[in-house]
Image: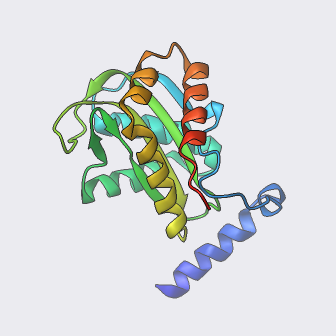
Amino acid sequence: MLARKQQTQKQASENKTPEKKNMTKREPTDGLIREGHILANLNAQNKKQALHELAKLAAPITGLSEHVVFDVLFAREKLGTTGVGHGIAIPHGKIENTDKVFGFFARLSQPIDFEAIDEKPVDLLFMLLAPHDAGADHLKALAKISRMFREKAFCDKLRAASDAKALYALLSEGEKNVESPN
C-alpha cells in the first residue's frame, strides 16, 4: 500500500506542468475564492447533484477529474453532513495531486435538502479542496469559511447579490474581514 502511494505521488510530481512546479507557496487560507470559482444561480434538485456541479466547476481549475473531486466530496458526506445550518453547507475534502487549497462557491436558485444539522434546506455552498497532506492548513481554511458564514448579515448579502461578480466582491471582502492574526 505504501509503495503504491509513493508511486502515485511520484507519478503526480512527474505529471505536473513546469508552471505548477514553479508556483510560489502562498498562505493556504489566502484568497480562497477566485472570480471563476462561483456559480451564481445553481439549479440543483438534491445534494448529490449540487456536489456534482461543484465538482464539474472545480475540475478544470484544479486539474483534477470531475469524478475524483465528486468522489472525495461524496465520501466526506457519508461520514457526516457538511450542512452546518442556517442554509449553509461547507462541503470539503482532501485531494491527492494538488499542492494548494481551493475554494468554490455556489448559490442555489432554490434551497435543497442537504441533511443539515438544523434540518433546514441549504442554498449557500462553499466547497473547500485541500492537498491530502494539508493538515492544519485545511483546518485553518475551514475555520476561516465558518467565521465568514457565521454572520447572518453576510449571508443575507450573498442571497441578495445580483450576479457572480457581486458574489465575488462580497466573498473577497468577507475573507479580508475574517483574516486570522498570525
Q: Of residues 36 and 169, which is closer to you in this image?
A: 169
Residue sitting at the far top: 162
Q: Quadrant of residue 89?
A: top left
At x 33%, y 36%, the residue is 88
Q: Quadrant of residue 108?
A: top left
Horizontal and vertical percent position of residue 21: 79, 63
At x 56%, y 54%, the residue is 180
**Quadrant (top left, top right, bottom left, bottom right) of the C terminus:** bottom right
Q: Is residue 102 above or below residue 88?
A: below
Residue sitting at the far left: 119
Residue sitting at the far front: 181
Horizontal and vertical percent position of residue 92: 42, 52
Can see residue 1?
Answer: yes
Horizontal and vertical percent position of residue 98: 62, 60
Horizontal and vertical percent position of residue 23: 79, 58
At x 39%, y 47%, the residue is 91
Q: In this view, does 42 lie above or below 80?
A: above
Q: Which colour scheme is used?
A: rainbow
At x 51%, y 68%, the residue is 136
